[in-house]
Amino acid sequence: MAVLTIEELAVHLQPGQAVAGLDLGTKTIGLSMSDLGLRFASPRPVLKRVKFTQDAVTLLSFAEKEKVAAFIIGLPTNMDGSAGPRVQATRAFVRAMSEKTEIPFVYWDERLSTVAAERALLEMDVSRAKRKERIDSAAASFILQGALDRLSSLRAASTAS
């Protein structure tokens, strides 16, 4: 079960399960976690990327510790909607991870998530050095929060029917 849509994830998730948000960069992986009620995304420490095998072990160790039921991974689509090299790299990462875990992945459009994260950190008056450390996890939180908001609206629609 490698990749699900957000609608399939809404059906797949059991009550009390948490999901993780990922912002995949070339040097780091930004991480965030939902609460068990799937309402709020909270940043977690950034993972420094080394090589895929080691990155996978670190990520799966995090997933086991946090009891991750699914990963929401940002898909860095270009502003015009086209897929560039970063989209291809993200899809390749997910394909490789799907060979190592049964935890499903959901792609989430991450356009402007880094811009929003940067703006939020500036509003909190975070220093430039600290922003550089925290930007990827803040972006992962924006990605995850968008997906959590969508899951919430899907749950509301299913109970209204």
Image: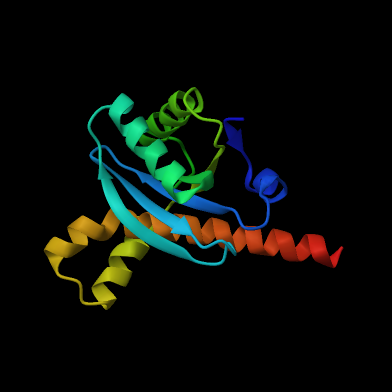
Question: In the figure, is residue 118 to the left or right of 8?
Answer: left
Residue 75 visible in image: no
- The residue drawn where x is 28% and y is 77% is 123
Callout count: 0
- The residue drawn where x is 69% and y is 48% is 7
In percent of width and height, residue 115 lies at 33, 60
- The residue drawn where x is 67% and y is 57% is 15
- The residue drawn where x is 33% and y is 37% is 58
The quadrant holding residue 126 is: bottom left
In percent of width and height, residue 101 lies at 50, 30
In percent of width and height, residue 122 lies at 24, 72
Residue 105 visible in image: yes
Question: In the figure, is residue 110 to the left or right of 160?
Answer: left
Question: In the figure, is residue 7 to the left or right of 79?
Answer: right
Q: How is the image coloured?
A: rainbow
Q: Residue furthest right?
A: 161
Of the 4 image quadrants, the one containing the N terminus is top right
Of the 4 image quadrants, the one containing the C terminus is bottom right
Q: Nearer the viewer, residue 161 or 78?
A: 161
In percent of width and height, residue 71 lies at 50, 44
The quadrant holding residue 50 is: top left
Q: Nearer the viewer, residue 119 or 160?
A: 160
